[in-house]
Image (tube, rainbow, N blue to C red):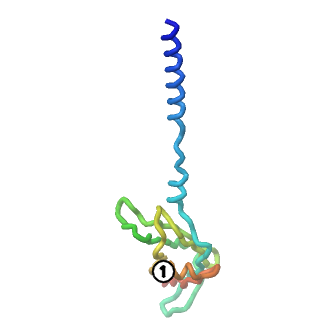
């Protein structure tokens, strides 16, 4: 009887140990690090101006939304896998600043698409070779 009681106590202790050990949260830091979005230190700068039909600059446009989409190397865009897109806005003098994704969703950046009313494609090599600021074209909005 005493022996059976000791066996039950040992079994209870072992099951408590196994349950407490099995309930620990697994360390998935490497997954988060792998899929984390990182950026280049380079800033892209440009302007948005209103132009007349003759091509004369009239005034800067504040609050214009500029979209930057990033094509990822080896990733196939689909309805399940969307290219990362970010939105930036021009300030009171029409100036906008964008940042460039280096790595996202486990893939390296390959190309950038900067869009307002026209599309500018930018190869990642140009961004890699830039120092601090990469000058982008002025977006011309025709009145």
- Residue occupying image coordinates x 53% and y 14%: 6
Whether 3 is drawn above or below 16: the answer is: above
Q: Nearer the viewer, residue 14 or 136?
A: 14
Residue lying furthest top:
1
Q: In this orientation, does residue 115 appear?
A: no
Residue 15 relative to residue 131: left or right: left
Q: Nearer the viewer, residue 43 or 35?
A: 35
Label 1: few (<14), some (14–19) or many (≥20) C-alpha neighbours in 10 Å = few
Q: Position of residue 78 (x, y in %)?
A: 35, 64
Q: Position of residue 72 (x, y in %)?
A: 44, 70
Residue lying furthest left:
78
- Residue occupying image coordinates x 35% and y 61%: 79
Whether 127 is drawn above or below 21: the answer is: below
* Badge 1 element: strand
> Where on the picture, by quarter, is residue 48?
bottom right
- Residue occupying image coordinates x 46% and y 79%: 117
- Counting the numbered discs, the total is 1
- Residue identifier under label 1: 123
Q: Nearer the viewer, residue 30 or 84?
A: 30
> Where on the picture, by quarter, is residue 138?
bottom right
Q: Nearer the viewer, residue 22 or 41?
A: 22
Q: Position of residue 46 (x, y in %)?
A: 58, 81
């Amino acid at each position: 009887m005493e022996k059976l009681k000791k066996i039950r106590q040992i079994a209870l202790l072992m099951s408590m140990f196994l349950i407490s050990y099995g309930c620990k949260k697994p360390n998935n830091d490497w997954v988060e690090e792998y899929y984390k979005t990182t950026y280049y230190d380079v800033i892209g700068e440009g302007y948005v101006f209103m132009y007349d039909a003759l091509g004369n600059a009239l005034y800067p446009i504040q609050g214009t939304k500029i979209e930057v989409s990033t094509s990822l190397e080896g990733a196939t865009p689909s309805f399940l896998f969307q290219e990362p897109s970010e939105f930036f806005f021009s300030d009171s003098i029409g100036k906008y600043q964008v940042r460039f994704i280096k790595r996202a969703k486990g893939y390296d950046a390959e190309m950038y698409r900067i869009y307002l009313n026209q599309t500018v494609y930018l190869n990642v090599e140009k961004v890699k070779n830039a120092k601090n600021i990469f000058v982008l074209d002025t977006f011309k909005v025709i009145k």
